[in-house]
Each structure stands twice: as C-alpha cells, then as structure tokens.
Image: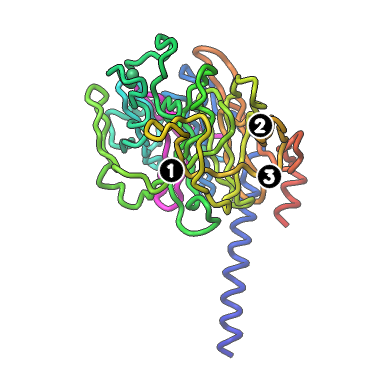
Amino acid sequence: MKKSLFILIFASIIFGQQQTNAQTLASLPLTQNGGTWDSGHVQGIAVDKARGYIYYSFTNLLVKYDFQGKLIGTLTGWNGHLGDLDFNPNDGLVYGSLEYKKDNAFYIAIIDVDKINAVGINASETEILRTVYLKEVVDDYIADLNHDGIKGANDDDSKDGQKPKDHHYGCSGIDGVSFGPRLGHTDGKYYLTVAYGIYGDIGRNDNDHQVLLQYDVKDWEKYKSQLIESKPHHYGPDKVDGKYFIRTGNTTFGVQNLAYDDNLKRWFMGVYKGKKPNFPNYSLFAFDAKTKAIMSDLVGVPDENSKKWEKGLLIPLSSDGLYDDKSGIKGWNQKADVGMQPVGNGLFYLAVNSGGKGQQTADLTLMRWTGDNQQPFKPINIEELNKIKH
Ligand SMILES: [Ca+2]
Ligand SMILES: [Ca+2]
Ligand SMILES: [Ca+2]
C-alpha cells in the first residue's frame, strides 16, 4: 500500500515536471525582436524560462521582454560597457560583465530584474544594479609586461614598437558570462564563469588562448555595491575558484558570448573571428564539461622566470566540428557573437544584430543543435517544436 503511494507521488512529480517542461517549451517564441534603440549594439541575452522573460544587453541599456513579445521595461544610466549576460535561477538575478577600461576596473553587474517594470529606469537612482569588482581580471589587464612603469589603460600597445606589450594573455577586459558546473564536471553546483576579452593583436603570440574564471557567488552579498562611476569601488573577491585556458588561436576581443548547455553538457564560446593567418579563425568554439583541465604549457606566453612557456590549466576543445590540421584547432563557422542562450532540449536562441547608430536592434531565432559541422544550428519550426514536446 505504502509502496504504491510512493510510486504514485513519484510518478506525479515526474509527470508534473514533464508538464512544466512541455509548457515552457510551448511558450518559447520561435523568433523575437528586441526593439530598436538609441544605444550600443546588442551584446548578449539571458532567458528566464520559468517566468517567461528575455533580457537583452545593448551595451548601455538592458531591455526586458516577455515571451509574448511585450516590452516590460528598460534599465539605463551607466557609461561602462555591459557585455554578455546570464540568468541565475537560484536567485532570480541577471549577471553581466561590466567594463570601465579607462579606470582599469572590471565588474560583474548583478541586476534585480524583477524590479524592471517600466521603460527608462535609471540604474544610478535605484538599487537595481549592484556590482562586484574582479581583481583577477584587473591584475592581468594592468600587468606591466614591458616594465616601463606604464600600465593598464595608460599603456598604448600600438606605441610599444619592438618592446613586449602589456596586458597578460592579451587581456582587454571581460565579456562572456555563463553559469555552469565546475569545469571538468557535468554536475554539482553552478559557478559564475567569466571569459576575458583578448586583444586581436596579430603582432604578439601570447594572446592565442581564451581565459575563463570561475567564481562561487554564494558569498557575494558582502561585495555587492552601488557603482559610483566617478569613484569606481574595489569590492570583490581577491581569489578565483578556478582559472582555465582554452587554445583557440587569437580572436578579436575574446569570448563575446559564453554559454553552458546542460543538454549537451558542453560550453560554447562565440567570438569575433581572429586575423592571424596561422589559425583557422572559426567564430564558434566548444569544450565538453567533463573534460579535465591539464596543467600544460601556454604556448606563446613567456614565463619571465624560467624563460620557457608559462603553465596553466588547459582544456582541450571538443572533438567534433571543423578541423584545422595545421594548428589542431576545432570549431565552427557560426555567428554566436551578440547573443547565444541554450534553453534545454537541444534548443538555443541565437541573436543577429542590425541597424546603425541610433537604431540598434536584435533578432532572436530559436534554433536546434544539428551536430552538422557545416551548419551546427538550424531554425526550428512549430511542428518540430511540437514533436519535442510530446
Ligand atoms: Ca607597460
Ligand atoms: Ca561583446
Ligand atoms: Ca551568456
């Protein structure tokens, strides 16, 4: 008797979850336009599946739409560069990268998106947007590699001539942001994962790796601070919970969009193509969540003490995709640089930007992962979506 009751409860929970998942899938818009704005271009998106919202970062503007395509509100009022986003279902907040390069200051913006309920809310007049300072990124950005005493934003690499150039690993700041399991694992708690921007400088060899940092945000309440732009604060963790390197060859400003797909158990990195002729310069790279990082040479990054290559925790790229013999690099030619968000069941939103100054817009398309090296994502239609549901 008791046993059958358990089975009944268990079955109803599973059935209930399937119902919820089916309902969520059914409510996903096949396409969405993120509005036209006098702002910077779209940088990234975040999706709250449970409550049915899509968030767009337009560099100096955050826009909130519901799944029906209704504009719910916007947040403005900062001069820094808001980049890629992710939604954290554990606290209901959106996390995004926020750069103040001239101030040598890099933050995670943590946005209480529940409170975005009107168009034109000014972040500086509310407590909706809080920030946490990332010392690790700043340390690499301001590294005085050429020992001329000039650092960070003040050292203009283009004037360095034959001297070594500043900015460790070519760090230009941060952009890609995603929650996901500790690298090397497919389960366990999720960590906030932040990707470096990397200068697309073809005249240096130390900028051919992507750099990812992982942070456990459980204790971040104590750091979260209002950002006074005239006096950028330094409240944030001194240490990272993990620092990893992925050799992709150089890109133009590093990982634009970072996304963890729990369906494929895979991390995706969308980039602006690099320009070095010795690399294939793909626009999308991936690595698998289970792949363990191995302490290895970071080829091209000189170790000042040993005169060899610096070492770091290196994660190999996924084994599928297009393959470049010469460099051993794998990846895809797929636009994934201004918005990419997995939403489960092998489905992803991918963004395309258009419009010029004063009229920036973003169009999202719901796509499915195909595994085809030539066309890894294909738009999904309503019939295909219904097939997944049942
Ligand atoms: Ca310098
Ligand atoms: Ca970007
Ligand atoms: Ca992201």
Residue drawn where x is 50% and y is 20% of the image = 204
Mark 1 and 2 residues: CB-CB less than 8 Å, in contact? no
Q: Is residue 78 magenta?
A: yes
Mark 1 nearby-residue class (10 Å; few <14, some 14–19, many ≥20): many
- Calculate the distance from the C-alpha at mark 1 to the C-alpha at mark 2: 23 Å
Secondary structure, mark 3, is loop
Chain part drawn in magenta: 68-97
Q: Earlier in the sequence, mark 1 or mark 2?
A: 1
Residue 277's disc is none
Observer-side mark, 3 or 2, equals 2
Whether ligand 3 has any atom under 8 Å from the Cβ at mark 1 is answered as no
Residue beneath the point at 58% across and 25% down: 272
Q: Is residue 276 left or right of residue 199?
A: right
User: Visible in this render: residue 77?
Assistant: no
Q: Position of residue 285 (x, y in %)?
A: 62, 36
Please state which of residues 11 and 198 is positioned toward the viewer in this rendering: 198
The residue wearing badge 2 is 327
Q: Which residue is label 1 attached to? A: 243
In front: 375, or 68?
A: 375
Residue 343 lies in the magenta stretch: no
What residue type is disc 3 on? Ser
Residue 239 percent location from the top left of the image: 32, 44
Name the amino acid, label 2.
Ser
Can you tell which mark lies on residue 319?
3
